[in-house]
Amino acid sequence: MFSSWISWFLSSKGNEYFCEVDEDFILDRFNLTGLNNEVANYSQALDLITDNLDDDIQDSLRGSLDVQARLLYGLIHARWIVTARGLAKMIEKYKRADFGRCPRVLCNSQALLPVGLTDIPYEKSVKLYCGRCEDLYSPKSSRHGSIDGAYFGTTFPHLLFLVYPNLIPPKNGPADFGGPPNSLGGAGGVGSGVGGVGGAGDAGRIRRNRIREEPEPSEGGGDQIVTSNVALKADRYRPKIYGFQVHEIAKLQRWQEAVRDRQVSRLEALEEAKKM
Ligand SMILES: [Zn+2]
């Protein structure tokens, strides 16, 4: 019934990463808490998304409202895809490799998942997370490369793997689902992946240009690239769920702190006993 704006949005070119947000999720105002502060003309934008906008308003405001409606849908989408039903919808897209495949040869065309580097809109564009090499890549197409990362959020892929540990890809061997249908060099398909996001510096720029010019699957084989520079300058990506780190080192650090705290309280107890 009301999903005509949404189906138009989803079918528009460049919006292939988005899934359909259920209408009862949008209609439950609790799910939209705080978004009225993020989106100008919030109520009209919401009316536009839900196809309830008055026709007379539509003519005068239409242009700017469309921008606000996209922003609102994106922010709702980020909240939706970390719900049980939202995760299930994104898994369908993941299994179809709608988000592309990892350009790293040893990842065997592993399907990617979208992720934001920040949950604040208008700051960083969407990146693609490979569950196998645990690195980030930029989307191949510029249409996808300009999508706001906040529309997917920093939590989504990691929560997906937390809830569905069976979907965590193996570290080696063929991809779980939808490997390239007998295509040679399929790993090059995603193309201009940029290993290590942010602060890649000159070496990173050279590498990026090189990949754009000759989209071959192998990385780091060129003459003018000093691999150590790239490695030193690239920030390591740290998966987070609602801001909490989830990688092994974080687990180790939590364990180390717990051991330390236990030891401290044991010492404190000994001191107390000595005083008595
Ligand atoms: Zn990978």
Image (tube, helix red, strand yellow):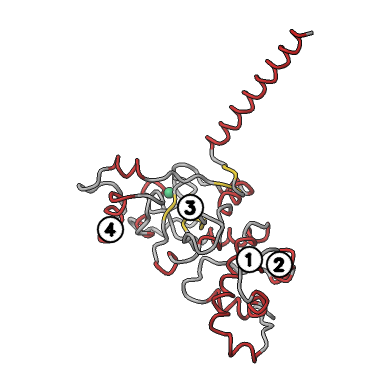
The kind of residue on which mark 4 rests is: Asn
Q: Which amino acid does label 2 sit on?
A: Phe
Marks 1 and 2, how far apart in space? 9 Å
Q: Nearer the viewer, residue 33 or 105?
A: 33
Q: Which of marks 4 and 3 is nearer the N terminus?
A: 3
Q: In which quarter of the image is residue 8?
A: bottom right
Is ligand 1 within 8 Å of the beta carbon of the residue shown at mark 4?
no
Image depth: mark 1 or mark 2 in front = 1
Q: Which of marks 1 and 2 is nearer the N terminus?
A: 2
Residue 74, picture quadrant: bottom right
Mark-to-mark CA distance, 4 and 3: 21 Å
Q: Residue at coordinates 31% horizontally, 53% vertically from top-left?
A: 217
Q: Which mark is residue 209?
A: 4
Which residue in the protein does label 1 denote? Answer: 76
Q: Name the residue carrying label 2.
A: 25
Marked residue nearer the N-terminal end (2 or 3): 2
Q: Which of 114 and 89 is in front in this view?
A: 114
State the mark number for residue 129.
Answer: 3
In the structure shown, which secondary structural element does the residue marked by tag 1 occupy? helix
Precedes in sequence: disc 4 or disc 1: 1
Counting residues from the N terminus, which is met first, the one under dot 1 or under dot 3?
1
For the residues labelled 1 and 3, the Cα–Cα distance comes to 21 Å
